[in-house]
């Protein structure tokens, strides 16, 4: 899990200049032995203007960790969570 946290620390919120890990926007990280990672992303507000920017960056950063096969992000506490979850799932379908 340490490498996943290191990757999350590379995703910086441009408004605060702080990373998503230190901002405590990431919860419930699960790293399976098969390389599957799941986590919850909870944007800083229910109308966070950067959620659609940060979530794909989070996914790409974690996917870049050696040994990670799949990344499942569940967005919570955001008015457009359902739409953002669909976008993140479509990244898998497009092979990104």
Image: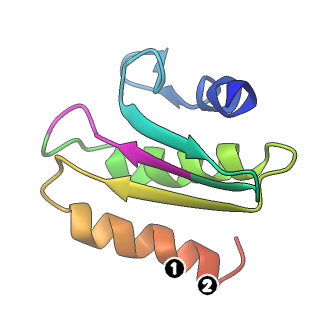
How many neighbours does mark 2 have within 10 angstroms: few (below 14), some (14-19), or many (20 or more)? few
Question: What x and y, as percent, mark residue 46?
Answer: 13, 44
* Labels 1 and 2 touching (C-beta < 8 A): yes
Residue 29 position in % (x across, y down): 50, 39
Q: Quadrant of residue 28?
A: top left
Q: How is the image coloured?
A: rainbow
User: Residue lying furthest right in this view?
Assistant: 66
Q: Is residue 42 magenta?
A: yes
User: Which residue range is magenta in the image?
Assistant: 38-45
Alpha carbon distance from label 1 to label 2: 5 Å
Give the secondary structure at mark 1.
Answer: helix
Q: At 70% across and 24% down in the image, what residue appears?
A: 2
Crowd class of label 1 (few under 14; some 14 to 19; many from 20; radius 10 Å): few
Q: How many marks?
A: 2
Can you give x and y, in whole percent of width and height, for residue 45 in the image?
Answer: 16, 35
Q: Is 78 included in the stretch rendered in magenta?
A: no
| Percent position of residue 71, x then y | 61, 58
- Left or right? Give the position of 22 relative to 58: left
Question: In screen coordinates, is 71 left or right of 89?
Answer: right
Q: What SS does tag 2 mark? A: helix
Number of the label disc, if any, that sits on residue 18:
none
Image quarter of the N terminus: top right
Q: What residue is pinned by disc 1?
A: 90
Residue drawn 29% across the image and 40% down it: 42
Residue in the foreground of this view, choosing between 86 and 52: 86
Write down the residue under mark 2: 93
Q: Is residue 9 above or below residue 55?
A: above
Left or right: 54 in relation to 47: right
Looking at the picture, tell me which residue is in the foreground, 54 or 21: 21
Q: Quadrant of the C terminus?
A: bottom right
Q: Residue at x 85, y 50 (%)?
A: 67
């Amino acid at each position: 899990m340490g490498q996943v946290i290191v990757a999350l620390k590379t995703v910086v919120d441009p408004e605060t200049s702080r990373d998503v890990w230190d901002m405590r926007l990431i919860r419930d990280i699960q790293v399976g032995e098969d390389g599957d990672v799941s986590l919850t992303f909870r944007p800083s507000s229910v109308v966070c203007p950067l959620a659609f920017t940060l979530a794909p960056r989070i996914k790409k950063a974690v996917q870049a960790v050696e040994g990670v096969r799949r990344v499942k992000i569940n967005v919570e506490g955001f008015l457009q969570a359902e739409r953002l979850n669909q976008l993140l799932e479509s990244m898998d379908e497009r092979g990104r």
